[in-house]
Every structure is written in C-alpha cells, then in structure tokens.
Amino acid sequence: MIIALGADHAGFKLKVFLSERLRELGFETLDYGAQSEAPYDYPDAAFAVAEAVSKGVARRGICVCGTGIGMAIAANKVRGVYAAACNNKEIAVISRKHNDTNVLTLGARIVSDETALDIVRTWIATEFEGERHESRIQKIHRKESDPGQRTNFQGKATICDHPLVQHKVSIIRNKNTSVKEFRELVQEIAGLMVYEVTRALPLAEIEVETPLEKTRAYTLEGKKLAIIPILRAGLGMVEGILRLIPNAVVGHIGLYRDPATLLPVEYYCKLPGDIAERDIYILDPMLATGGSASAALSLVKSRGGRRISLVSIIAAPEGISKVHEEHPDVEIFAAALDRHLNDHGYIIPGLGDAGDRLFGTK
Ligand code: RB5
C-alpha cells in the first residue's frame, strides 16, 4: 500500500518518525513536505496529500500538524477525500469502520510518537464495514459533487437549474408546444440532466497512449448503468439518456392506479437480472403525489436494487416529501420544483399530463 505523508512545521518531526516506521513495516511512502521545522502552512501539505489520494497516486494519506484539526479541514476540501483528526485509537477505528476515511490527520502537540504510530497502524489495518454506513457515505459523495448550479431543496432533492434546462422546461410547459417539439425537448432535458445525475459516479484510473505519450486517464468504474422508465411517460426520457450513456441497460416498470384504493398496482416489470450491482436511474417526468415513484422504488429494491436515483423533470413538494420519507436513501433529481398539487393530483403550474403530451393522446 502506498501512503502519502504531509506535515506543517509543527508536525514535521512526527511525520519523519511515522514515515520511517511505515517503511520498516513494508509500506511505500510518499513525502509531500514540510521538509523542516521552518514555518510551513498546513493547507499546502494537506492539499498535496489529499490530491495524491484523490487521484489514486496513494491509497491512503496521513497529515500531521499541531492538532490535526487544520489538516482535516483542508484535506476535506479535496474531492474524494474523507479525512478525520483522530488523536486516539478508538476514534481512528470508527473513522475507518463507519466513515471509510482515507486520510488520517494527527496532532503532534496532542499525541506522543508511539501513540501516533499505534493509531496509524490500527487505522491502516481497519476495514470499512459497509452495510448501513454505505448509503450514508454515498450521500456525502453526492453532496461533494454539488457543482453550484444545482439547488438543494431542503436537503431532499437536487434541482438542476442550469439555464439550458430551464429554457427548455419553459417551452414544454407552454400548452401550445406541439407533440413533436415536446417529445424532442423532454429527451434533450433528460440528456442535459444526465451530467448532474451521474456526477458522483466512481472513476477508475487507466493508462492510455495518446499519439504523443502514455498518460493516466479516467473511465467509469463498475457495471454499466441501468435506467428504468416508469411506463408510459418515463419512456419519453430514455433516448435522451441513452444518447449519452449508450451502454446502459433498460428495465421497464408499468404501474396503474387502482380506481378503488387509488394505490399503484404493478402490471409490468422487467428488470436486468444483475440489478444489485448497478447504479440505477428511475425515470418519471412528473413527480406528483410520489405514489408511483415510491412503489417503483420499492419494486426495484425488492429485486435487489441498492444504488438508486429518481430522475423527474417537474416535481411537486408533496411528491418529493413522500419519496424522501419512504426512501431516504434515494437521491431525487428534478429540472423544476413546482408549487403544489391540485385536487386532481396534477402538478401546479406543471405542464399537464406528460404521457398525453408525449404521445399525442389528448
Ligand atoms: C501551527 O501552529 C498550528 O496552527 C497547526 O499546526 C495546526 O494545529 C492547525 O490546525
């Protein structure tokens, strides 16, 4: 395992000590400074170590300052880095088991050299427990991918308010927009939303030979994605997404509302067999009451689906709340957040019935 080390002036000596001990233990170490006890700003070392971990140059990072605090704050600004100041062994263990930390920060003014070494050895040897901690970690991954143009709706949904998306949404809202144009625009909006929806996907490093030299490059890691439209309106978003993710597999879920109970009833469901291993995007242009979306999510989960996002174009607060309450692990994306539902369950102002407008059935 390659371990990146960094320190400021206060942590310099402890860093040297740890680096030597780690090499004796058989680890490869990379030194990102400081190189003496002359004043050295901790963010410089923290960023260098964190970048090394984030880019996969080192598997783990260890940063030492006076307290460990400044290093943790700075390292956590780097995407893909989860740093914790652990000045005792118990916290170091939990930080691996529960939080999957990949950078450990230590306070040279808080712990002795031997205690620090004990913490480091234990931290390196402890595995992430996964399970219930996995979805929590995923939430953090997603949050850090927030590019700024995404609005967070009370922590429950991400509204993709990119100007191009908003422009196109305003056209599909217009009741005079033709079926042809509506259909094309729904696909385009779905395609534009893909950038936001897939932002947190993990990448794997590969080597590529350009016409000039060999270089590191990044490709999507893991199994191909699965997209699952809820019939029938969800079909309107499929092509737009496949244009960008042509290798995605496509499942289908058909639900109708029982006129007596008003509850969604499944009438069709065909999902990829290996759904448990894929990132899944459930598509439904209108998130109104949230009944169908929630039922579709339960169905996908009952077949083993774990990493699931719901992608809608227009969402009502009622629908977001229902899905959020019943499936807090699912991230919701929408292009617009509307006011509320009317007495017939239509989103206001909305755009009418998306299925009818897509297929010209009204
Ligand atoms: C440097 O004196 C000190 O502020 C630094 O090492 C660290 O404790 C910051 O968090």
Image (cartoon, rainbow, N blue to C red):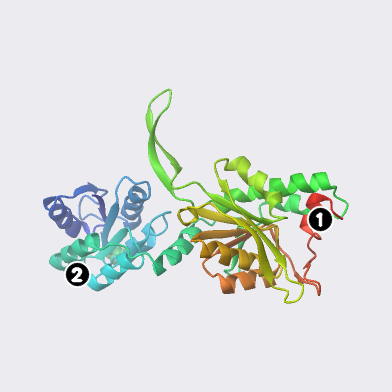
Residue 356 is labelled as 1
Closer-to-camera residue (113/156): 156
Residue 167 at what x, y percent from top left? 75, 50
Residue 72 at what x, y percent from top left? 34, 63
- Name which residue lies at 57% across and 69% down: 155
Q: Give amino acid for label 1.
A: Asp
Contact, CB < 8 Å: mark 1 with mark 2? no
The picture quadrant for ligand 1 comes to bottom left
Q: Earlier in the sequence, mark 1 or mark 2?
A: 2
Residue 280 is labelled as none
Please identify the quarter of the rendering in which residue 60 is found.
Answer: bottom left
Please identify the quarter of the rendering in which residue 231 is found.
Answer: bottom right
Question: Residue at label 2?
Answer: 111
Q: Residues within 10 Å of mark 1 (few under 14, many from 20)?
A: few
What residue occupies the far left of the structure in this picture? 24
User: Is any part of residue 10 visible from this angle?
Assistant: no
Closer-to-camera residue (316/82): 316
What residue occupies the far top of the structure in this picture? 211
Position of residue 37 relative to residue 107, above or below, is above
